[in-house]
Amino acid sequence: MNDPDRRVLRDDFPLLARSSHGKPLVYLDSAATSQKPQLVLDTLDRCYRLHNANVHRGVYELAAEATDLYEAAREKTARFLGAPSGQQIVFTRGTTESLNLVAFGYAMPRLQPGDEIVTTLAEHHSNLVPWQQVAKRTGARLTFLPLLPDGTLDLEAAEKKINPRTKLVTIAHVSNVLGTVHPIRRLADLAHRVGAALVVDAAQSVPQRLVDVMALDCDFLAFSGHKAYGPTGVGVLYGKREMLQRTDPLLFGGEMIDRVELTDSTWKDAPWKLEAGTPPILQAIGLGAALDYLSGIGMDRIHRAVQDLTRYAYVSLADLEGISLYGPGPGTERGDLLTFNLGDIHPHDIATVLDSEGIAVRAGHHCCQQAMRWLGVPATVRASFALYNTRADVDRLVDGLRKAKELFQA
Ligand code: PMP
């Protein structure tokens, strides 16, 4: 996909036609949330107008339509991830809820004092804080895989760290701060060799690259609809069949039950036992439309295009005097985001100058305070790229950064 193709795709995203502070908007915060293609907006509109009813309950035609659409979204999601069955897809509110479900529904009832949960120093808080809580409540220990200076995993050390006490390894596929791409299949093999489960936070990978859960051999995988060009309020937890069966519900109530007696109840099978209450019906259907949109373009094509743009951005930014770019260099595979500081200008000042130029980037700790400590900085700027960004967006970013330098380093 070259830049003209990307400009055509951009037209699928109505929001990108707006301006910000009187300038054409350059949206470089897709790692936080992505914009939505017309197909998703049309699907939501059509479903609210024509197919809105609660699912799994009514016998009337409308309710059957809503149920079919919701369950079809589950099947689409399974196909998108290469999962053998829709029954391996649980709809949640997002990556955070999916990871909490694994932590409290699967891990907590199993972990014992002395067991180890292995993770890295650069996880999003949603893949750290739940494990801290589970460790506290079970007496298990959290241990951390060391990183090499460029932010990639020290695999030799990982081989030693993942040991017979390890019960679970949990890691991001693509780091939302360093942009590192972790060798998931290798980690799955290391985890399985000692009988541990592998949990993957795929929030930053599913939107931008082909993710095949069978090839990765992960036990659980989580992602958010809103980062994958779908609506907010819906997320996914994929699990191997037996792993989902062994996961206890965290929420109890309607929808998830089989038989209810006065003092006890039994549950449906997974995934439904893990979806108590009215699920995010329209959001899941909207996510299904987003996945259709991505499949229609082709994930390989999207991946190559965004990688090409990220490389262009890396080289363009690397030219700026005083820039510190974090994470792997251009010779190493990296995700579609760049995290950086510019001289001693505060990241929030940079983001404010960029904002005045109509450019949206993120500044702060990116829900990853421990990675900031590892980098030795309080905060960074992050520019993240999606299938609708173009080289012209990157050029505007570079111009904006030059302006910030002029203003703050004059
Ligand atoms: N993990 C990673 C790597 C992320 O980038 C994010 C979102 N920034 C999350 C988890 C949390 O996603 P959500 O807020 O949609 O639950």
Image (cartoon, helix red, strand yellow):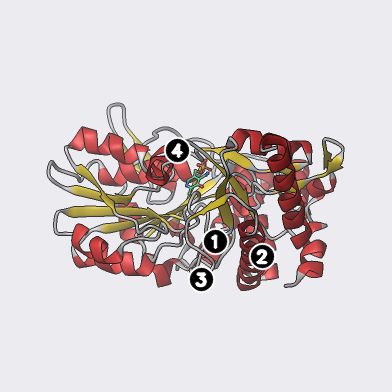
Q: Residue 299, image x and y in percent? A: 61, 69
Contact check, label 3 and label 4, Cβ < 8 Å: no
Q: CA distance from mark 3 to mark 2?
A: 13 Å
Residue at 65 percent of width and 72 percent of height: 301
Labelled disc at residue 276:
4
Q: CA distance from mark 1 to mark 4?
A: 19 Å
Depth check, mark 3 against mark 4: the one in front is: 3
Question: What residue type is disc 2 on?
Answer: Tyr
Q: Which residue is mark 2?
A: 312
Dot placed on the residue nearer the N-terminal end, 3 or 1? 1
Question: What residue type is disc 3 on?
Answer: Gly
For residue 91, side relative to residue 117 (left or right): right
Dot placed on the residue nearer the N-terminal end, 3 or 4? 4
The answer to which quarter of the image holds residue 12 is: bottom right
Depth check, mark 3 against mark 1: the one in front is: 3
Whether the residue carrying mark 4 lies under 8 Å from ligand 1 is answered with: no
Q: Which residue is mark 1?
A: 75
Dot placed on the residue nearer the N-terminal end, 2 or 1? 1
For residue 232, side relative to residue 131 (left or right): right
Question: In terms of secondary structure, where does tag 3 sit?
Answer: loop
Q: CA distance from mark 2 to mark 1?
A: 36 Å
Q: Which residue is mark 3?
A: 331
